[in-house]
Image (spheres, helix red, strand yellow):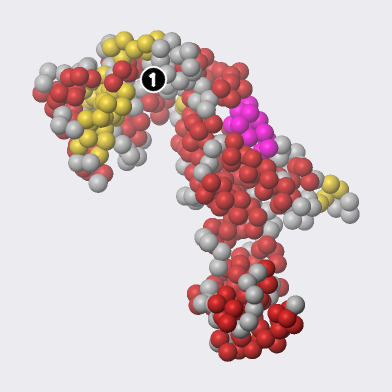
Amino acid sequence: MDEKLRKNAEEIVRTLTEKGYIAYFAGGCVRDMIMGIEPKDYDITTNAKPEEIKRLFKRTILVGAKFGVIVVVKDGINYEVATFRSEIGYKDGRHPDEVIFTDEKEDVKRRDFTINGLLFDSLKNRIIDYVGGKDDINNKIIRTIGNPFKRFNEDKLRMMRAVRLAMRFGFDIEENTFNAVKCKGFEISEISKERIRDELVKILTEGAAGRGIKLLDKAGMLKVILPEVADMKGVEQPKDFHPEGDVFTHTILMLDLMENPSVELAMGVLLHDVGKPKTFEVKDRIRFNEHTDVGIKLANDICKRLRFTTKEIEYILNLIKNHLKFKDVIKMKKSTLKRFLSMDKFEEHLELHRLDCLASHKNLANWEYCGKMMKEITIEEVKPERLINGDDLINAGFTPGPLFKEILNYIEDEQLEGRIKNENEAMNLVIQKFSEKKLN
C-alpha cells in the first residue's frame, strides 16, 4: 500500500509535467521523507489551475476549487492537488478572504512552519527549500514561515499544531514562535470546539502526550482549553501512594507512559483524577473523598464541550468510574470479580490501572492478580448463559415488575459464585428465597 501510495503520487506529478505544468510533492510528506518517516499521504502542488487539473484526470473531487484545491482519486486513494497560491485576509481566523494564483515561492510563504514548507521534485529527485526547512529539521526546530503573529492570526489552531509537532518529533519551538504562542494563546478559544478536539486527540495519541500537555500549559492554552486539567497543578497527594508529586505531575507521567492508546483510553488517562482538585482536604491525611463521582461529572462536561461522540463519552466516563475499583479486586466476591472482568474492553481498564500504578507507587500486585484471574477463569464463567429468564418467573407465578430484576441479579450472583449450576437449582432457589414476595 505504501509503495502504491507514492507511485500514484509520482504518476500524478508526471502527468502534470508531461502536459507542460510544474508539479511537486509538498508539505508534511516531504518533511517525513527527509526524516526517514513513511508518509501517510502525499500532497501535490502545481501551477495548473483547478479546471486544468480536473480536465487531466478521470476522477476528481471539488473540495476547495475556489481555494485552488482539487482531490485526484487514483486506485481509490485521494490525493490533494493544489494550485500555487497566495492568500489574503483571514477574517474568520481560518479561511482566506481571497486567493491569488501565483508561483511556488509565494505558495511556500503562505504555509505554516518551515518544516512543512519544503517541496520535492519527484522526477529529478531533488528537494526545493525556500524557507530553511531542512536546517530546522536538522536542528530540531519548529519555526513559523515569516512573522509568527501573522501566521497565527491566519489560523489560530496553528498554535496548537506547533505544540503537537514539537511533541511528536521531540523538537523545540523557536523562541520568537513560542513567544507569539504565549502572547496569543488565549485566542485559541476563538477556534471551533471540534477543531480543538481533533488537535488535542492528536496530541494525546501521537506519542509523548505528557510533554504535549505540558507545552500547552507553558504556552497558556491549557487553562483555556482544559481549565479543569490546569487546576491539577499544585494539588498535593499522600506521599505514601504518590511519591511522584502532585496530581498534574502524576497525570503527565501516565500520559508519557502510554503506547498507541485509543482516543478513549487517552482521555480516560488525562481525566481519571480530574475530580481531585475539587475534593482535596486534609484530615488525618490528604484525602479526595468522592473524587471519582466529581470527576465523572467534570469529565462529562469537558467531553460534551469538546464535542466527543455519545459513545466515546460513555466509554471515557466508564474508565474514570472504574479506575479505583482495582484496589479491591483481591477481596472481591467471585461474582463481583467476574462481573468486573467481563466489562466491555476490560483490557483498557486494566491498562489505565497499570499506568496509574507505574506513575505512582509502582505496586502492580492487583494488575498481576487480574491478569492471572483472566487466564484462569473461562469466558463461560465470566459471561455464562442465564439459567432462567423472565418467562420462567412468569410460569412460576411471579408478576412482572421490579422484583424480576432483583431475582435475576440474585440468581446470576449465585451462578457466578458457583453455588448453582442448572435451571432446576435456580428455580428451587427462587421459590425458596422469593415465594413470600410473590404472594405479596
Looking at the image, which residue sits at the far left?
18
Q: Which residue is mark 1?
A: 111
In the image: residue 359, left or right of residue 76: right
Q: In the figure, residue 115 lies in which quadrant?
A: top left
Q: Residue at x 68, y 72 (%)?
A: 403
- Does the segment drawn in magenta span residue 115? no
Looking at the image, which residue sits at the far right?
284
- Tell me where residue 322 appears, x and y as whole percent: 64, 58
74 or 115: nearer the viewer: 74
Above or below, comparing residue 30 to residue 240 in the picture: above
Q: Main secondary structure of the magenta part?
A: helix
Looking at the rendered image, the quarter that the C terminus falls into is bottom right
Above or below, comparing residue 362 to residue 399 in the picture: above
- Does the segment drawn in magenta span residue 218? yes
How packed mark 1 is, by other alpha carbons closer than 10 Å (few <14, some 14-19, many 20 or more), is some
- Tell me where residue 289 appears, x and y as whole percent: 79, 52
In the image: residue 204, left or right of residue 362: left
Q: Residue at x 71, y 52 (%)?
A: 292
Q: Amino acid at mark 1?
A: Arg
Q: Residue at x 31, y 14 (%)?
A: 85
- Please state the extent of the stretch shown in magenta in the rendering: 216-230
Q: In the figure, residue 98 lies in which quadrant?
A: top left
Disc 1 secondary structure class: loop
Q: In the figure, residue 280 lies in which quadrant?
A: top right
In the image: residue 155, left or right of residue 294: left
82 or 28: nearer the viewer: 82
